[in-house]
Image (tube, helix red, strand yellow):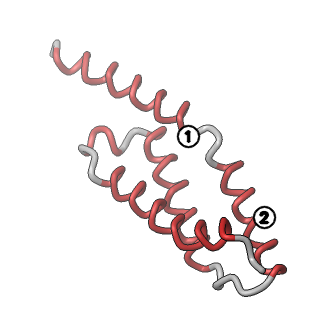
Amino acid sequence: MLALSPEFFYRFLPTYSLLGSSALQGLPFIVGVNPWIESVYALYKSAFETLLQFPEIHDDAEEEKFTKVLDDLVENFQDVIPRLAKGKKRNYQFLYIIRFI
C-alpha cells in the first residue's frame, strides 16, 4: 500500500508552488525585478511545472520516482531564504537612495 505522504505531497505541492509564484508576482515592480527575487520566482515556477507534469502515483515504482523529484526540489530550494534576504537587503538599499533624491 502506498504511503500517505507521497499522495499528500503529490496533491499539495503544485498548489503551494503556484501560490508562492503568485505571491511573488504581486510584489511591486521595483521589488519583482530584483535578481534575487526573480531567481526565487523562477524556482517556484519551475517546481510548479515539474510537479504538474508528474503522473498520478499508483504503485511503489511511481512513488519512488516522485520521491526522487521531491529530493531534487528540496535541494533546489535550500537557499531560498538567503536569496530572499539578499533581495530584501538590496531593495532597502535602493529605496533608501531614492528617498534622498
> From the image, which quarter does the C terminus lie in?
top left
Q: Residue 6's x, y, as percent? A: 67, 69
Location of residue 8 by image quarter: bottom right
Residue at 63% across, 73% down: 7
> Tag on residue 68?
2
For residue 63, above or below residue 13: below
Q: Residue 53's x, y, as percent? A: 60, 80
Residue reaching furthest to the front: 1
Instruction: Give yes or no for contact between labels 1 and 2 (Cβ–Cβ under 8 Å).
Output: no
Nearer to us in this view, 59 or 3: 3
Q: CA distance from mark 1 to mark 2?
A: 20 Å
Looking at the rendered structure, the secondary structure element under dot 1 is helix
Q: How many marks?
A: 2
Looking at the rendered structure, the secondary structure element under dot 2 is helix
- Check disc 1 and give the amino acid type: Val
> From the image, which quarter does the N terminus lie in?
bottom right
Q: Is residue 5 left or right of residue 30?
A: right
The earlier-in-sequence mark between 1 and 2 is 2
Q: Is residue 53 left or right of residue 67?
A: left
The residue pinned by badge 1 equals: 80
Nearer to us in this view, 6 or 23: 6
Q: Is residue 24 left or right of residue 29?
A: right
- Check disc 2 and give the amino acid type: Lys
Q: Residue 25's x, y, as percent? A: 32, 54
For residue 89, above or below residue 37: above
Residue at 41% across, 23% down: 89
Location of residue 87 by image quarter: top left
- Is label 1 or label 2 in front? 2
Residue at 78% across, 85% down: 59
For residue 43, above or below residue 12: above
Q: Residue 48's x, y, as percent? A: 52, 67
